[in-house]
Amino acid sequence: MAAKSHVWVSRPLFDDVIARLAAHCEVRVEPDDEPLPSATLSARLAESDAAIVGPTQRIGAAEVSAARHLRFIAKLGVGYDSLDLPALTRAGIGASNTPDVLNDSVADFAWALLLNAARRVNAADRWIRAGNWHKPVGMGDWLGHDLYGGTLGILGMGRIGRAIARRARGFEMHVIYHNRTRLEPAIEHDCAARYVDQDTLLRTADALVLVVPRTPATHHIIGAAELARMQPHAVLVNVARGGVVDEVALAEALAAQRLAGAGLDVFEGEPAVHPALLALDNVVLSPHIASATLATHRAIAAAAVDNVLAFLGFGPHAGRPPNLLNPEALRVAGNASAAAPQPPRP
Ligand code: NDP
């Protein structure tokens, strides 16, 4: 009987989801979510044929250099900027992510941040808890800005961006978007969204949501110059990745009231948050939880397991992981699939 493949899971997942893996493989699950020292990470990868890793686990050439058996990495979540995909491909290691299953949860959360930033919900909550509410609020106090009827700008009109756009109908907002590539007319129609250049997006939006992947091209795609083009009553929401926004420039714009508010779920140095942001009352902060609902986290875990099982030759997608990011990796000589004969374990 062929030896079972070894699968390492970098964080606790749902027991019943792991059980589907364990039916076919030897599974090792890390007991907590603590980031692993890089030597431990490399050692775990070296012991494994496949791995399921969290959204921020950085893996590149150094981490896989001793991983003779490793042939597949399934990332939990859709953004895969934490993986050095070219390095994994050169090493003949396939990688997958979990797109689509989180679109609606992330879109809901983007709206939570939009409404919160525009109507100052968290600031009001803090104000009450601090014991400040002693008399009726005046007509000129706590004024926010309407989202209703305004213009919603979306930078990155992909799977999640479109889910955000569809929700704008209920607010009777005009939706404009910018991508490098304009969408098909049928998709624009479905989202009731109009394509504009990036400058128009910045200058026209009353609320701007960022949902681009983190790549070299999107690093600080919103910096001081871009913020200066936005309307002073506008709000900015980032559910994409830290590093897409220049946080120092954003904090300066918010402090100077050159931008009314912001909602940030992701940060360049997370879990550290820039102190200038922490000091501001007109920014709402959340700890990278836009996809965090029970149903969606279960779906993300299940999708990652499906990808691993498919790679290992099990289930309805045997041999064809549904969310494979680098098919060329599996064409590297001798690495066609984990179902193919593997070098013997030491
Ligand atoms: P998609 O790939 O479906 O959409 C990304 C969009 O961004 C595409 O429309 C793409 O269009 C556009 N884009 C890419 N590069 C640029 C650029 N340089 N300038 C302008 N537009 C650009 O991804 P998803 O919608 O599934 O996810 C988007 C991102 O959201 C993920 O990469 C991830 O980082 C983040 N995310 C964050 C979560 C959280 O917990 N906060 C949860 C889930 C996702 P084009 O290629 O034509 O430019």
Image (cartoon, helix red, strand yellow):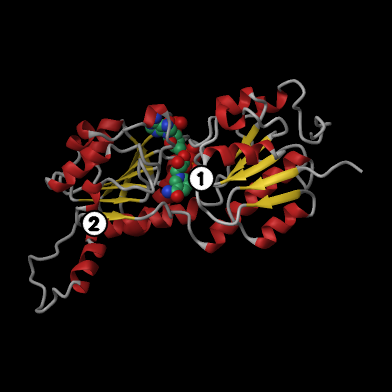
Q: Is residue 278 left or right of residue 318?
A: left
Q: Amino acid at mark 2?
A: Ala
Q: Toward which corner of the image does residue 96 lie, by quadrant?
A: top right
| Residue 118's disc number | 2
| Mark 2: few/some/many CA within 10 Å (<14, 14-19, 20+) | many
Cβ of mark 1 under 8 A from ligand 1: yes
Q: Is residue 116 left or right of residue 218?
A: left
Quadrant hosting ligand 1: top left
| Mark 1: few/some/many CA within 10 Å (<14, 14-19, 20+) | some
Cβ of mark 2 under 8 A from ligand 1: no
The front one of 293 and 63 is 63
Residue highlighted by disc 1: 55
Q: Amino acid at mark 1?
A: Pro
Identified at 58% across, 40% down, the residue is 41
Q: Is residue 6 left or right of residue 61?
A: right
Decide: is 78 above or below 168: above
Q: Position of residue 328 (x, y in %)?
A: 66, 24
How many angstroms separate mark 2 from mark 1 (CA)?
A: 29 Å
State which quarter of the image contains the N terminus: top right
Decide: is 94 above or below 170: above
